[in-house]
Amino acid sequence: MSLVTEAALLAALKTVVDPHTAKDFVTGRQIRNLKIEGDEVAFDVEFGYPAKSLHAALRRQFIAAARSVPGVGNVSVNLVTRITAHAVQRGVQLLPGVKNIIAVASGKGGVGKSTTAANLALALAAEGATVGVLDADIYGPSQPMMLGISGRPESVDGQSMEPMSGHGLQVASIGFLVDPDQAMIWRGPMATQALDQLLRQTNWKDVDYLIVDMPPGTGDIQLTLSQRVPITGAIIVTTPQDIALLDAKKGLTMFEKVGVPILGLVENMAVYCCPNCGHTEHIFGADGGKKMAEQYKLDYLGALPLNMSIREQADSGRPTVVADPDGEIAAIYKAVARSVAVKIADKAKDFSSKFPTIKVSKDT
């Protein structure tokens, strides 16, 4: 008969704390399938967000905690990630094949929104999630070039199309359907319809997070997207410059009006550091994004420097997270991605996809 008790083990495992939530895994009911056979112990640890980079360190902590209990010998720990669908705007149905949609918006162009969207998608994928990217900028699609993808999407049935693939991401963009130098001279309703078809007629394959690279501005296309697309949350991208902050606030207001929660704010081009002498300069102003986050009680997700490598890597089709995965800038993108995933995991789950559609017809 084993002398090791479940109560003693759980008390020991309670000392291991999730570095992102500051909560222990026992209280969070993340310890599953606990088995005790003699001096051997086995259990699963369930994560609601992708955290591949944390697994090795946490596994060591769990093993050490379990072995601190007298009588425990061999310890087997299995870390499992189960990402589920979370709540979206009321009255909007989830998208088939997609669990969570994250809108990346700026309110204006030129603040690095598309670069941020691409790197956040790659960071989530690096942490073990299945990730898609929807390039929602009909007039100026940039994700095909940014992710180094060319060609035309395939259609098996003539009704829908397969997503393109690049760096492990599933990608859809109007840029795959038109020539690179072709101007999209469309009125708002046409562009909105094209975007809706691109979103709903792409065969997304069990995507945990679909990153939507929103077009700049807060016009008809952006508003329609915010109302019709089941968005789990939005990220606002800005620079510290006052004019960029002004437009970022408009984007924030738009999402609030349609009931889309803001997951946080990312500040691009926050500081320039001279590569030759090391001198730093706040070219676009200092801490504008941080002050905006404080004013509107938003999570300040992180600040990216004004760095030539970010631009060069994106232009070459290998954004920072894949071009320099262990670098300082990639670490910032990965930290932002984990923070966003943790925030989504804390939201209420959406069970609408679990239930069948019921139609009531009147007998004649």
Image (cartoon, rainbow, N blue to C red):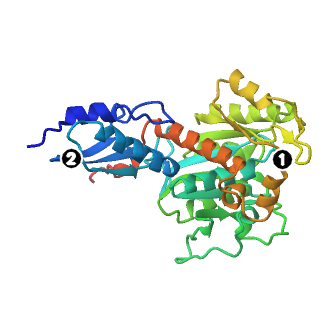
Observer able to see residue 232: no
Q: Using the image as rendered, state which of residue 121 and residue 86 is in the foreground.
A: 121
Task: Pick the residue in front: 12 or 157.
Answer: 12
Q: Residue furthest left?
A: 1
Q: Residue 2: image x %, image y %?
A: 12, 42
For the C terminus, the image quarter is: bottom left
Above or below: residue 268 compared with residue 151: above
| Residue 182 is at least partly visible in this image | yes
The amino acid marked with disc number 2 is: Lys
- Contact between labelled residues 1 and 2, with CB atoms less than 8 Å apart: no
| Vertical arrangement, residue 7 with respect to residue 2, above or below | above
What residue is shown with label 2?
Answer: 35
* Eye-nearest disc, 2 or 1: 2
Number of labelled discs?
A: 2
Q: Of the numbered discs in the image, which one, if any, rests on residue 110? A: 1
Residue situated in front as seen by the camera: 35 or 174? 35
Picture coordinates of residue 360, whole percent (x, y):
32, 49
Left or right? Give the position of 93 relative to 301: left
- Number of residues whose C-alpha sits closer than 10 Å to that of mark 1, classed few (under 14), some (14–19) or many (20 or more): few
Residue for point 37% across, 45% down: 46
Give percent across and percent down for residue 6.
Answer: 20, 36
| Dot 1: element | loop
Element under disc 2: strand
In the rendered view, tell whether residue 81 sits above or below residue 269.
below
Q: Looking at numbered disc 1 in the image, what kind of residue is underneath it?
A: Gly
Residue 321 position within the rendered picture, expressed as x and y whole percent measured from the top left: 67, 55
- Where residue 288 sits, quadrant-wise, is top right
